[in-house]
Image (spheres, rainbow, N blue to C red):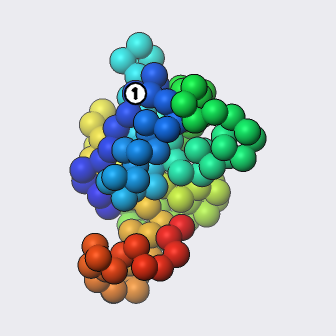
């Protein structure tokens, strides 16, 4: 789980969100909208679908591409429970919440790394392979 998560607002453009995600080397950002209850998530896949549809990333807003109907994980979930939720829901990221607070973001990659017991690649070598 990544305890420090990237957050974006609904008024960010997709390009702004993509730049932030790229600079942090993450595949998802939590969307916080002070005018609406609850949180959402924007993933690299959401941005890809928009671009594939020919939409302009400089004018498309995060608000129109975020997912708001989410499954949340509890900090006491096992990796097996988290993986099962991801497979059932067809998604690769789970927001971990403790009460009303976001504790972190768990990705399928986090689970695979834990199960494979492989250390995270050095930053200089991380860009050498295909990411996904």
**Residue plotted at (43% across, 36% down):** 16
**Residue at the right extreme of this rendering:** 53
* Residue 75 rendering spot, x and y as whole percentages: 30, 54
Q: Is residue 10 left or right of residue 84?
A: left
Residue at image location 44% in from the left, 28% down from the top: 12
State the residue in front, 93 or 88. Answer: 93
Pick the quarter of the image with the C terminus: bottom right
Q: Residue placed at 50% from the left, 70% from the top?
A: 131
Residue 19 location, quadrant: top left
Frontmost residue, 41 versus 9: 9
Residue 102 appears anywhere in the view: yes
Which residue does the image show at 24% across and 50% down from the upper left?
Answer: 4
Q: Which residue is mark 1?
A: 9
Picture quarter with the N terminus: bottom left
- Taking 59 as reference, is 93 above or below it? below
Compared across the picture, whether 9 is left or right of 1 comes to: right
Q: Residue furthest bottom?
A: 117
Quadrant housing residue 125: bottom left
Residue 5: where, in percent of width, then height?
30, 47
| x and y percentages locating residue 38 in the rendered image | 43, 27
């Amino acid at each position: 789980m990544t305890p420090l998560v990237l957050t974006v607002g609904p008024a960010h453009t997709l390009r702004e969100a993509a730049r932030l995600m790229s600079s942090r080397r993450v595949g998802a950002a939590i969307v916080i909208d002070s005018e609406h209850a609850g949180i959402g998530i924007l993933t690299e896949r959401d941005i890809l679908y928009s671009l594939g549809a020919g939409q302009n990333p400089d004018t498309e807003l995060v608000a129109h591409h975020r997912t708001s109907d989410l499954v949340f994980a509890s900090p006491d979930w096992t990796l097996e429970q988290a993986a099962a939720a991801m497979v059932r829901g067809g998604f690769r990221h789970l927001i971990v919440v403790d009460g009303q607070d976001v504790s972190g973001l768990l990705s399928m990659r986090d689970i695979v790394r834990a199960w494979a017991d492989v250390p995270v690649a050095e930053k200089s070598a991380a860009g050498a392979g295909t990411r996904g």
